[in-house]
Image (cartoon, rainbow, N blue to C red):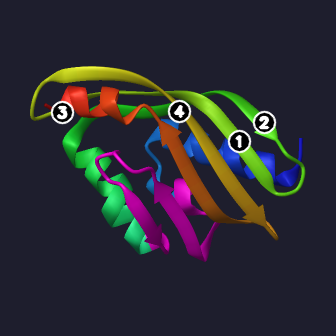
Amino acid sequence: MSEASDIIKAHYAASDRGDLDGMVEAFADDVAWTEMAGFPYAGTYVGVDAIKAGVFGRLGKEWEGFSADPDEIVDGEDGTVVGIGHYSGTYRATGRSMRVRFVHVWRVKNGKVTGFEQFCDTHLVRAAMD
């Protein structure tokens, strides 16, 4: 596995611990984070502060026990790393739970995460919210 793969594994491990600072430790200042169309927080967030506020902060406030658990990490060895796994959690406002498969495409350059793109079944996420 490459350094890029190790960085992404460390991100998921920090997420599992609830360590927000650890999650963003290797993020470039201008990292671009894209949540797919149809996802509740859809859009591209640029920079750590925007990602914390627009994605991680909202997930923490709106979901009980939200987690992104990778089942597999695929190392593209060119700075591209793919995480394949499941989201799970309970939406606080409805009390409904979900478990949704995801694919995350990560871009790492010079030891820093420069990009992230999410793919998942947004319908199943929204069904827990309705």
Disc 3 target residue: 129
- For the residue pair 86 and 24, the one nearer the viewer reads as 86
Marks 3/4: CA distance?
A: 18 Å
Mark 4 nearby-residue class (10 Å; few <14, some 14–19, many ≥20) = many
Q: Secondary structure at mark 4?
A: strand
Q: Which mark is residue 82?
A: 1
Q: Which mark is residue 102?
A: 4
Q: Amino acid at mark 3?
A: Met
Mark 1 nearby-residue class (10 Å; few <14, some 14–19, many ≥20) = many
Say if the magenta span includes residue 98: no
The residue at 32%/65% (across/down) is: 53
Marks 4/2: CA distance?
A: 13 Å
Q: Secondary structure at mark 1?
A: strand
Badge 2 or badge 3: first in the primary sequence = 2
Disc 2 target residue: 74
- The magenta stretch spans which residues? 22-48
Residue 10 in sight = yes
Asked whether the residues under the numbered discs 4 and 1 touch, taking CB atoms below 8 Å apart as contact, a structural biologist would say: no
